[in-house]
């Protein structure tokens, strides 16, 4: 019986997808796998028997990826499952920035209930007038699942859309509207666009990517939207740009002590994926990823190990080996099995940076002694019998 521990409340639409043989448990130390949303796992002592973690969402900055990889724990996320929810909030952010709707609503609250409110509104509304987004130029940096959705939707609203992504996948390219102009120089986005929205992962290379130099290239009065990760935008540079009027509005889904007091910054309390539909979609996708990994050894959408798929296990036995990506590892594994008289009917090996994954279908079950010998190979992190 597989045991699943939920670190956060997870939509029942996801947990209900687990087979009847699975059990939700309260004790992390007894779990085979973990479902998590926003709870931080960085300080947790992860049990030796833990096999996998599935993040019901895209970002995994709350999970110690290197630590998990070293323990042979596969970490999954759910890219694209919340894309529509985030897309809709980005569109909302553009509309809020185009017109001072927030300021107008706040002003109405100061005169609510007065006898002259209707006349006062007609006199005072000009202070909150703005522009339309139709006909304006939107630059989308990062054309993954969310970026493509935003680009296509904005194009449908009459905006001219420019997209930048040096790693544009074939799948994303197929989904991207032909009306979206794909540019190869990110500086063109900064120079040409009235609105700029960022949809890239946070890494050492992207941290602070919208900074002083990039802002200097922008049109005066540009609007910057950040619904991806807080640290993608340099707060000090953005504060200066807002004070000087270089940037008209900064809309972010990640309030912090710096941006929450910036003039012209609209801070939304991280609501991008906070919709019933997004939470359901993420939970379902995460549950399916864990089930396929636990039952068949297949990896899909992992962030610390390579994706690998050998379908449903139909062999006499299947073993999964998580190991370092080093020379002669396959030779040592197959040699060990050959020495024990075990025939391999099918084998798949995939690597990702310093880690690799090997799935083997065998004509006969492995003995406990053989499994121990596989575990003893230098560089092997975890060995698991699937069936």
Image (cartoon, helix red, strand yellow):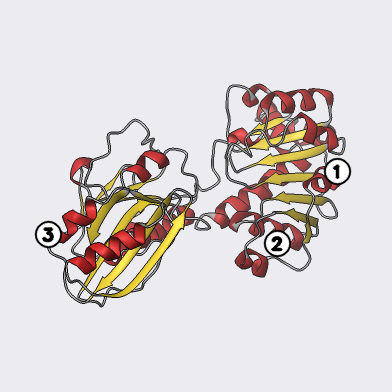
Which secondary structure, mark 2? Answer: helix
In the image, which is nearer the foreground, mark 1 or mark 2?
1
Q: Residues within 10 Å of mark 1 (few under 14, many from 20)?
A: some
Query: In terms of depth relative to the viewer, which is nearer, 385 or 271?
Result: 385
- 1 and 2 marks in contact (CB < 8 Å): no
Query: Measured from the top left, where is residue 1 in percent x and y?
Result: 16, 59
Tell me: 25 left or right of 65.
left
Query: In terms of depth relative to the viewer, which is nearer, 144 or 166?
Result: 166
Query: Measured from the top left, where is residue 269 in percent x and y?
Result: 55, 35
Q: Which disc number belongs to residue 152? A: 2
Image quadrant containing the C terminus: bottom left
Q: Can you tell which quarter of the image residue 364 is in?
A: bottom left
In the image, which is nearer the foreground, mark 2 or mark 3?
3
Lower position in the chain sequence, tag 1 or tag 2? 2
Query: In terms of depth relative to the viewer, which is nearer, 277 or 361?
Result: 361
Q: Which disc number belongs to residue 368? A: 3
Q: Would you say residue 17 is visible in this rendering? A: no
Residue at x 38% of width, y 68% of height: 348
**Residue marked by disc 1:** 191
Q: Would you say residue 198 is visible in this rendering? A: yes
Query: Measured from the top left, where is residue 272 in percent x and y?
Result: 55, 46
Query: Measured from the top left, where is residue 217 in percent x and y?
Result: 84, 37
Q: Can you tell which quarter of the image residue 176 is in?
A: bottom right
């Amino acid at each position: 019986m597989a045991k699943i521990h939920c670190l956060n409340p997870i939509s029942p639409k996801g947990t209900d997808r687990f087979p009847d043989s699975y059990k939700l448990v309260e004790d992390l130390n007894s779990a085979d796998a973990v479902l998590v949303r926003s709870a931080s796992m960085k300080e947790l002592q992860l049990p030796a028997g833990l096999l996998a973690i599935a993040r019901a969402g895209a970002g995994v900055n709350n999970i110690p990826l290197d630590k998990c990889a070293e323990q042979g724990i596969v970490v999954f996320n759910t890219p694209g499952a919340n894309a529509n929810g985030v897309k809709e909030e980005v569109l909302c952010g553009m509309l809020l920035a185009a017109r001072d709707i927030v300021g107008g609503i706040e002003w109405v609250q100061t005169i609510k209930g007065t006898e002259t409110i209707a006349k006062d509104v007609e006199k005072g509304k000009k202070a909150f007038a703005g522009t339309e987004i139709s006909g304006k130029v939107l630059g989308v940096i990062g054309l993954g699942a969310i970026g493509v959705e935003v680009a296509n939707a904005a194009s449908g609203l009459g905006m001219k859309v420019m997209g930048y992504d040096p790693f544009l996948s074939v799948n994303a390219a197929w989904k991207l509207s032909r009306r979206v102009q794909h540019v190869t120089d990110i500086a063109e986005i900064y120079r040409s666009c009235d609105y700029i929205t960022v949809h890239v992962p946070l890494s050492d290379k992207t941290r602070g990517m919208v900074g002083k130099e990039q802002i200097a290239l922008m049109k005066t009065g540009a609007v910057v939207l950040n619904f991806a990760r807080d640290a993608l935008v340099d707060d000090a540079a953005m504060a200066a740009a807002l004070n000087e009027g270089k940037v008209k509005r900064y809309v972010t889904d990640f309030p912090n002590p710096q941006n929450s007091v910036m003039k012209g910054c609209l801070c939304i309390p991280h609501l991008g994926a906070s919709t019933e539909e997004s939470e359901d979609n993420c939970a379902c996708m995460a549950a399916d990823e864990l089930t396929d990994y636990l039952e068949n050894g297949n990896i899909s959408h992992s962030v610390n190990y390579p994706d690998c798929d050998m379908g449903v296990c139909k062999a006499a036995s299947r073993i999964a080996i998580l190991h370092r990506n080093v020379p002669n590892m396959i030779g040592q594994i197959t040699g060990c099995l050959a020495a024990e008289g075990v025939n391999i009917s099918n084998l798949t090996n995939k690597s990702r940076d310093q880690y690799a994954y090997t799935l083997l279908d065998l004509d006969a079950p492995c003995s406990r002694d053989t499994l121990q010998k596989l575990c003893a190979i230098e560089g092997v992190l975890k060995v698991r019998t699937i069936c």
